[in-house]
């Protein structure tokens, strides 16, 4: 199989994005504008034919050693094919290329095939919005309904979609317990501004007496609404502001042929919150590769074969003459 390695500047944006959009496992993360924002336009790709199959990746260096990591806010990448089913041989060819010139990789993939590679199955939560809001509301669990009622009862506590973009970005950054948004704020700001200029990104906040208590960033792409970033301050957690915010977006898009994609989570309390809105579970994979493991495994295999082939037993009068493990 003939695969080409292309640097970002060599990639044809129109052909690439057409392949992503027509792939059966289409997602927002693999678009050129999204990857550009999250990698400072430093991503690369393996490509088959005239963009029939593509595989983006983010190659970095540490102490001069090359490795591949998952870009920030890219829940899953992997292989994308333009109107064709990817065969197991094609999958193997792409992953062999991916591991051929790096020391290690840790990636999250959307590839829904039997994986021979070392992998861990992870959970994502999604909610089909085709039902009416009344029917969606019936599927909320008791705890979610209770939290929502509590949030609605708080005085001057409501959703606001017309707030200052900078104020919301600052709020998300200031209330991020992981501190990743502060570290990568330029990338996040570029993603938010790019998506808003493309008219597929939007910010929603919940305010109490004009003070932001919760904020979230969404992107609509294909048939999905991606719930990409969210944060609440201490008061917002107390008055359940995030429940009000999520319910608002669900209510706004209820009855549409769309899926609310929670973009996670494998964290127990967040997973419980997502499932409480009636979400279902879909799987994706964390795949890891380490060059030393491959070398070690190959070394052990060859050692065993060599030992077996070079084991010379010359028995003379029940005497062991030579055992050679060289």
Image (cartoon, grey):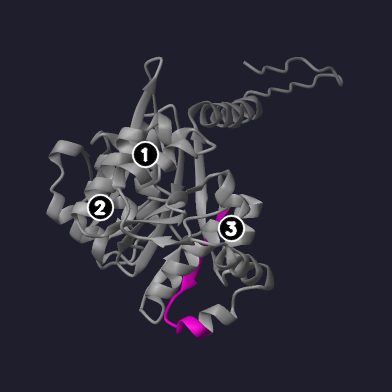
| Contact flag, marks 2 and 1 (Cβ < 8 Å) | no
Q: From what the image shows, is residue 253 above or below residue 197? A: below
Give the residue at mark 1.
98
Q: Nearer the viewer, mark 1 or mark 3?
A: 3
Q: Earlier in the sequence, mark 1 or mark 3?
A: 1
Which residue is most to the right? 318
Question: Tag 1, which secondary structure?
Answer: helix
Label 2 and label 1: CA atoms lie apart by: 29 Å
- The label shown at residue 20 is none
User: For the residue carrying disc 1, how many other residues have a C-alpha within 10 Å: few (<14), some (14-19), or many (20+)?
Assistant: many
- Identify which residue, 78 or 319, lies in the foreground: 78
Residue 3 lies in the magenta stretch = no
User: For the residue carrying disc 2, how many other residues have a C-alpha within 10 Å: few (<14), some (14-19), or many (20+)?
Assistant: many
Which residue is found at the position 72% from the left and 18% from the top?
323
Which residue is found at the position 45% from the left and 42% from the top?
107
Give the residue at mark 2.
195
Where, quadrant-wise, is the C terminus in this rendering? top right
Where does the magenta region start and end?
122-134
Q: Nearer the viewer, mark 2 or mark 1?
A: 2
Q: Earlier in the sequence, mark 2 or mark 1?
A: 1
Question: Tag 2, which secondary structure?
Answer: helix
Q: Earlier in the sequence, mark 3 or mark 2?
A: 2
- The label shown at residue 240 is 3
State the image coordinates of residue 86 (x, y, percent, origin top left): 34, 61
State the image coordinates of residue 30 (x, y, percent, origin top left): 30, 51
Residue 123 lies in the magenta stretch = yes
- Identify which residue, 157 or 194, lies in the foreground: 157
Q: Left or right: 131 with respect to 220?
A: right
Which residue is found at the position 81% from the left and 18% from the top?
320
Viewer can see residue 74: yes
């Amino acid at each position: 199989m003939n695969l080409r390695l292309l640097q970002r500047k060599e990639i044809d944006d129109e052909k690439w994005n057409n392949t992503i959009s027509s792939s059966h496992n289409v997602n927002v993360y693999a678009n050129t504008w999204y990857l550009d924002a999250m990698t400072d336009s430093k991503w690369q790709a393996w490509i088959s034919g005239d963009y029939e199959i593509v595989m983006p990746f983010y190659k970095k260096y540490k102490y001069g050693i090359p490795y591949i990591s998952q870009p920030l806010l890219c829940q899953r990448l992997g292989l994308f094919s333009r109107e064709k089913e990817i065969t197991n041989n094609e999958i193997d060819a792409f992953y062999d290329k991916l591991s051929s010139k790096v020391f290690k990789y840790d990636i999250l993939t959307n590839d829904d095939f039997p994986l021979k590679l070392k992998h861990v199955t992870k959970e994502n939560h999604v909610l089909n919005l085709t039902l009416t809001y009344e029917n969606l509301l019936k599927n909320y669990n008791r705890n979610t309904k209770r939290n929502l009622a509590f949030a609605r009862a708080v005085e001057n506590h409501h959703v606001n979609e017309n707030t200052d973009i900078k104020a919301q970005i600052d709020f998300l950054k200031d209330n991020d317990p992981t501190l990743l948004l502060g570290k990568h704020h330029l990338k996040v700001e570029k993603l938010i501004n790019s998506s808003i200029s493309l008219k597929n990104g939007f910010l929603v906040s919940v305010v109490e007496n004009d003070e932001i208590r919760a904020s979230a960033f969404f992107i609509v792409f294909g048939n999905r609404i991606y719930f990409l970033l969210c944060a609440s301050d201490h008061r917002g957690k107390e008055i359940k502001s995030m429940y009000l915010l999520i319910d608002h977006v669900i209510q706004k898009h209820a009855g549409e042929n769309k899926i609310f994609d929670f973009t996670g989570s494998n964290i127990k309390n967040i997973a419980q919150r997502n499932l409480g809105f009636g979400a279902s579970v879909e799987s994706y994979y964390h795949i890891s590769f380490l060059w030393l493991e491959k070398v070690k495994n190959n070394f052990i295999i060859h050692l065993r074969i060599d030992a077996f082939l070079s084991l010379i037993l010359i028995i003379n009068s029940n005497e062991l003459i030579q055992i050679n493990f060289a």
